[in-house]
Image (tube, grey):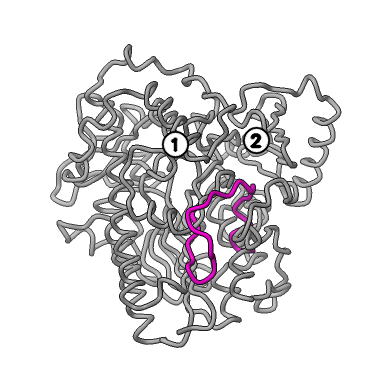
Amino acid sequence: MPAKPNILLILNDDMGFSDIGCYGGEIDTPNLDRLAAHGLRYSQFYNTARCSPSRASLLTGLHPHQTGIGVLTYDYGPEGYAGNLNQRCVTIPEALKASGYRAYMSGKWHVASSLEEPTDAWPMQRGFDAFFGTIIGAGSFYDPNTLTRGNTNIEHEASQDADFYYTDAISDEAVAFIHRHRAEHPDAPFFQYVAYTAPHWPLHAPEEDIAKYKGRFDAGWDDLREARLQRLVDSGMLRDIWRLSERDPTQPEWTAADHKAWRLRCMEVYAAQIDRMDQGIGRILAALEQTGQLDDTLIIFLSDNGACAEDIPEGVTVDELVHNLKIAKSHTRDGAQVHFGNDPSRMPGPEDTYQSYGTAWANLSNAPFRLYKHWIHEGGISTPLILHWPAGIRVRGEIRHSPGYLPDVMATILDVTQTAYPTRYEGRRVAPLEGHSLRETFEHDTAGQRPTMFWEHEGNAAVRAGKWKLVRRYPHAWELYDMEQDRTELNDLASLHPQRVQDMARQYDEWALRCGVIPRDKILALMAEQQEPAFWEKEEGK
């Protein structure tokens, strides 16, 4: 048995704070619930509000702009916004090589601008010994673009397999890596990164999983949001003084909603996507048990951003999705035309659909918080975080209210594996680690004792210092909230504490300058010169 713990890092895609069972949701996640019951849940852990930046931060322990992923994997010109994992950072698997770790990955990469030709920003060039997954950030669950093994494109494998479903493939490859590692490297510890695309759009799921949720959400988003908050309060996850944020003002109350059958089906498919992921996690846990490694493996589960309110509009062009963004294929594996856009006359789930579940359900997924993916209000950055490690975490089923964010994941992994963070890697200088280890929280809560945290994405920004959070929804003014009294961000105190706003804004400006954050106005000007924004970029002003 390895002297150092194995590390299993599981990340999922576009899932809200309160979707899974152990965080108050209606979705059946028995395997994640089991990890929570025998490990720790964190109530105030944060991501960076978007897919690529979160992955870059998670893998490097830095802020996204320091790694070259200031927005997404598109080149917006300035340093920090090249859309490509740069050489001034070191990844978790690269760092762990010094401690004898083997590294494996299955799932979504999404930190490289080159989608077809291997570069120094691809997984095998950034410390992984084996890779199966997609380089791009989204696509069909039945026939994904950029499917790759090692450095070789293997899209034909999915195209020729009538039973292929990407979530299952990610899980199955992770299981195979565990068994292969045990057989070939029994004395070495491993780092495994499992990066699901579920439940990112498009809404694709097997019919048997969708059917399981028939009727589960019939009460509608208003009643379900209230019920989720109550369960979170009853479990001790949230305080009873925090009020439910109002329904998104752009959305109708459930009783007035149209196309109810279609809307319910959207949420049922979304739930099925998460359910299928949890089933796969169960198979991964079984593989760890079968190989005698579960107790000595630190398992970390979290989401890359809050739930996604992006609408895929009816009439979105095939040219945009298929040819420009390369996140879809125009036809199914058997030659049928794919229908793009949220068309209420067409139920989501099958391969020939390409839809999203929309703002109102995303509002439920992020309950009780405000806003969504893209924004730095609590709905955009709050994630479930589950840690499970029987040999290293003695307490069982407790909740930690200690705040933390993505750079802390690498710091924690290096701490528990007794691995030093390098100042140089392969002859190049790398930026200092920005995170702080969570290891102290394994034994007891340390709420309020961590250094100041900072965020920026698309001009949306925040500073969290103790109980105070300064947050901005671009292009609007700074807002100030007391996170002890008002975590749902309903009572803006900026006008009552102008000096605190000024001081925290100054700290933000200093951090932004140090980390290479460029004012959003300048980035928008560069984007306007290069191309028409994609449909999700048009959502900013919502």
Q: Along the line of sight, which residue is nearer the eye, 221 or 443? A: 443
- Can the viewer see residue 113? no
Neighbours of disc 2 within 10 Å: few (<14), some (14-19), many (20+)? many
Query: How far from the left and from the top, in percent, is residue 45?
Result: 58, 47
Residue 71, by quadrant, is top right
- 361 in magenta: no
The nearer-to-camera label among 1 and 2 is 1
- What residue would you read off at disc 2? 459
Q: Along the line of sight, which residue is nearer the eye, 164 or 112? A: 164
- What residue would you read off at disc 1? 308
SS for dot 1: loop
120 above or below 443? Answer: below
Query: How far from the left and from the top, in percent, is residue 28?
Result: 30, 45
Query: How far from the left and from the top, in percent, is residue 57?
Result: 59, 55
Position of 458 compared to 261: left or right?
right
Position of 218 compared to 102: left or right?
left
SS for dot 2: loop
Distance from the alpha carbon under mark 1 to that under mark 2: 18 Å
Position of 42 compared to 247: left or right?
right
Query: How far from the left and from the top, in percent, is residue 445?
Result: 64, 52
Q: Earlier in the sequence, mark 1 or mark 2?
A: 1
Part of the protein shown in magenta = 386-411
Q: Amino acid at mark 2?
A: Gly
Which residue lies at the image location 36% right of the left edge and 58% below the top edge? 146
Q: Are marks 1 and 2 in contact (CB under 8 Å)?
A: no
Q: Along the line of sight, which residue is nearer the eye, 211 or 67? A: 211
Which residue lies at the image location 43% right of the left edge and 43% below the top edge? 15
